[in-house]
Image (cartoon, rainbow, N blue to C red):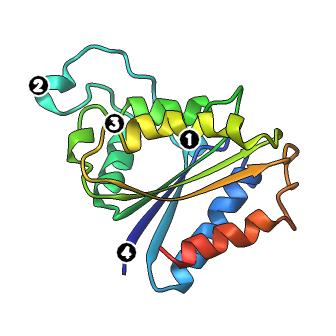
Amino acid sequence: MKNVLIISASPRKGGNSDTLCDEFMRGAVESGNTAEKIFLRDKQINYCIGCGVCNSTHKCVQKDDMTEVIEKMLKADVIVMSTPVYFYSMDAQLKTLIDRTVPRYTEMRGKDFYYIVTAADTNVPMLEKTVDAIRGFSVDCLSGTKEKGIIYAGGVWQKGEIQGTKYMNEAYEMGKNV
């Protein structure tokens, strides 16, 4: 049994990437894993202010929801990072979360990572730029992590367009095979 943490950076509750997170979670839970989804829109996570205090204290001076989120990230065996694609990169909510891991990111070792990205565009090579940006954190900066799966869900823009697509089953199966 694995502890799965799903980070939904969608600004729209029930949006396309958020819906895929739910399908991933359904598959993971049905396979006997524990799973929790954090919907970043519901969290108060401030921008990093670059003060540098955390470099020596390993604690952020800001008092917001990031303390709780980072604890969950540290306890997870599997982390799913999901974002809509904005101008071929992750949205601001996910980037802010990544920036705020600085106080304790060196403790996030040996985790499995999955990525779910949704976009109106269907050009996968362009969507890969988003995953490359996330990899800058998850694979390049974290020790012993493994990239386990990616869903590039292109051709979805309006809320709900993901319903009935092959991506729904892909997310479910990916979660099931965690």
Residue farthest along the front direction in this orientation: 125
Q: Is residue 56 above or below residue 24?
A: above
Task: Kindly check if marks 2 and 1 are in contact, taking CB atoms under 8 A apart as contact.
Answer: no
* Residue receiving disc 3: 101
Q: Is residue 67 above or below residue 53?
A: below
| Marks 4 and 2, the one that precedes in the sequence | 4
| Marks 3 and 4, the one that precedes in the sequence | 4
| Marks 4 and 1, the one that precedes in the sequence | 4
* x then y, percent, for residue 123: 78, 40
Counting other residues with Cα less than 10 Å from the Cα at mark 4, is it few (<14), some (14-19), or many (20 or more)?
some
What numbered label is drawn on residue 131?
1
**Which residue is at the front of the view, 50 or 62?**
50
Q: Which residue is at a point 88% across and 45% down the rendered structure image? A: 158
Task: Kindly check if marks 4 and 1 are in contact, taking CB atoms under 8 A apart as contact.
Answer: no
Mark yes or no: residue 23 visible.
Answer: no
Callout in the foreground (4, 2)? 4
* Lateral position of residue 80 relative to residue 143, left or right: right
* x then y, percent, for residue 138: 39, 44
What is the C-alpha distance between the residues marked 4 and 2?
32 Å
For mark 1, give the secondary structure. Answer: helix
Task: Kindly check if marks 3 and 2 are in contact, taking CB atoms under 8 A apart as contact.
Answer: no
What numbered label is drawn on residue 2?
4
Q: Which residue is at a point 30% across and 51% down the rendered structure image? A: 71
